[in-house]
Every structure is written in C-alpha cells, then in structure tokens.
Amino acid sequence: MKRTLNNSENGYNSKGLYILGSLYPHVTGGMEIFNYYFLDYQLNKSPDEIYYIGEKKTDNEGGIYIQLKKRWPVRIFYPIQLFKAVYKLRNRIDYAYISYAEQSWIISFSNSLILKYFKIPYIITIHWGKEPDWKFKYPFIYYFRHARTVIGVSEPVCTAFKKTIPDQEFQYVPPLIPFIHSRGQKSDLKKKLGYLNEEKLLLFVGSMKAMKNPDKIILAFQKIGSKSLEEQNIRLILVGTGDMDNHLKEMIEKYQLEKYIRMEGLVNRDAIPDYYKASDAYVISSDYEGTSLSLLEAMYNSLVIIGSNAPGINKMLVNEQNSLLYETSNTDQLAETIIRVFSDHKLSKNLAERAFKDFNLQYSYESMIKKYQTIFSSVSIQ
C-alpha cells in the first residue's frame, strides 16, 4: 500500500533525510552555501520532520543531526557510516534528499544501493555545472536512474546530463538563497572597506580555483596598465579563497598591481551584501557554471555585469542587453570590456537596470521553495 507524503489533511507530515556533506561556513562553494540556507529554511518552516547528515552540525537547533565523520579513505568509511545511519532511521524516514557534485562513483553508487535496499525513495539536486565525463559510467547512471526526481541547478546542466542519460527526466530549479540588500550608504561602505568614494570597484566573488579564472582578471588588469587604471580610478576586489591564493598574490606582486587589486580572502556571508552595495560592477570569469549564486546576487544588487561567454553564464546573461560578455580565454577582450564599463556610464546604467529587472522576472526564492516542497510531497513509498 502506498502512502502519499506530507498528507497534512490526515495529520501526517513526511520525514526527510537530507544527505548534504559539508555546509557553509566550513566550505564556501555555491552548493554548500545553498544547502546551508535551504536546510535552514526547511528546519524553520517546512512541515516535514527533518534529519540531516553532514560533517558538522548547522547553527540551527531544529531537526535531528547525524554526524558523518570524514575518515580516510572516504570511499570506504562513507558507505559504512551512511549504512549505519540509514539502518537506524529506516522506519522513521520517508524520503532522502541528496546534493550531487563531482565525486567518486563509489559515493554515488553506495547512496543509491543503500537507499534502495531500505526502500527509501530519493531526490537528487545536481550542482555540478559541466557535462559529466565519467570514466566508469554505470554506477552514476544507476544512481540517477533510480532517483525518484532529479533536479538540475540550470537548464544547461539538465541538458548536459540528459545527453548522457537520455531516458531520465531532469527538472530545472534555480538554486537561490534569500538575498538581502545592505542598509549602508554606498559612500560609507566604500570608506568602511578602505576605498575612496571616487574609486570605482569591480567585484569578483567565488572560489579561487582554475575553472573560475581569477588569474585572467589579473592579467586583464595588467594589460589595462597602471596609467589607465589610475586615470579611470578602477579597483578590483577578489572575495573568496582557494588553492590559487598564493599564485594570485604572486601575480599581483609581479605586475605591481597591489594598489589596484585587493584579495579579501574568506568573507563572512553576513558581510557580503556590503561588498555588493559598495561595488560598481561585477565580473564572473568561469569556464562554466550551473546557476551562479554570486551572479544572481550581482543582478539582485543592480550591478553592471561583465561575464565570460561560457556555458551556464550565457544562459543567464545576454550580451549588450543585461551584461557585457567576452570570450572566456581572451584577456585582451576582458580588459577592453572593463574599460568600456567604467567609461560609458549610460551603457552601464542601462545594463544594470535590465539585470535587476531580469532577476525579478525569473528568480523568486519563494517560488523555488514551493517547487521543492511539491517535489518532496509527491514522493511516495511502499
């Protein structure tokens, strides 16, 4: 006999197991930030009873936390810990929700085998932004095919995975968080961050890793040159951290750009709105993206946006309409685009206004939550 989940009319609320791994602030990637806010919202407002598995407990006191210790080798200890956790909860949970990013086939395969063994339907959200390139395909295909619902964080993600698994349906739901505007005045926030009011700030927010290409932005500044940077009063703020940190610092020193480029490192999420409010433009330089949270936040804050013409980014942005796009590896074109943004005020104003308008038309946090709750509610078990 099947039981429909979240049947509030019968006084029954479903019980969900969220398998999330690392969360913000311990890890600052887009998936981890999304999971943190999504879990927080669900713990506060969802009618479901929620259990969650992760490396560290969130600061929300709701729900029931099950620790997942990071022991090496992870490929062996993760499945063992997950099996034990699901075994204890097998009669108390109705569905499982899992976030997927690039990972070992053993992790994905063990997720599906364990949940199928205990007859627990599961839902997957794909946060991995590029087309899958699996050397050992079967475990991943098995994992996705046996999911009750598979969600992609962008339409290109859904399309890319559909090519690999054509008989599986993928549903696009944008990964939003509840953005807020800074209450400070722009001039005051610039002063607070150590800048003069006349200095024009270009903001980058993201992980300092190769696929994000922060080094390409530094190369573009080097090509603009200190004379033009001085004349235009252009400054770059790099917010985030990653394995390229030392390399980027060396580049800034090598090209003598210390006056024009500042690496802020890891910034607390609560302070991020101040950086957006203080800035005049935003740049995203990735090789590919799912649906970038930092890009969405730039649109929400009415910043003029410079973006690489890359998969995922060019699905959200339209060149000369709500942004200026450049070819990803073309640092000369990026340099020219930066100068254009800061010298053509009318163009920048129009682009920023259209980006804000597009954000409000296409992206709603409440709508996203409703889609997820509908998906969770529709799952049923034997």
Image: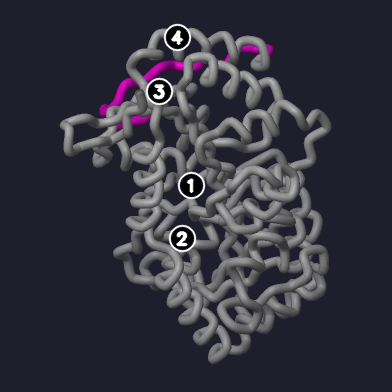
Query: The disc labelled 3 sits on which kind of residue?
Result: Gln
Q: Give the quarter of the image for residue 343.
A: bottom right
Number of labels in the image equals 4
Where residue 307 appears, x then y in whole percent? 66, 68
Start-end of magenta stretch: 57-73
Q: Nearer the viewer, mark 3 or mark 2?
A: 3
Q: Nearer the viewer, mark 4 or mark 1?
A: 4
Q: Nearer the viewer, mark 4 or mark 2?
A: 4
Q: Give the quarter of the image for residue 50.
A: top left
Name the residue that disc number 2 marks.
Answer: 275
Q: Main secondary structure of the magenta part?
A: loop
Front residue of 78 and 182: 78
Per the model, the C-alpha gap separating discs 4 and 2 is 45 Å
Front residue of 320 and 380: 380
Whether residue 53 appears in magenta in the rendering, the answer is no
Per the model, the C-alpha gap separating discs 3 and 2 is 50 Å
Identity of the residue drawn at 46% across and 81% down: 353
Q: Looking at the rendered structure, which numbered label has been put on residue 267?
A: 1
Judge left or right: residue 80 versus residue 59: right
Per the model, the C-alpha gap separating discs 3 and 1 is 46 Å
Q: Looking at the rendered structure, which numbered label has been put on residue 382?
A: 3
Q: Is residue 185 above or below residue 341?
A: above
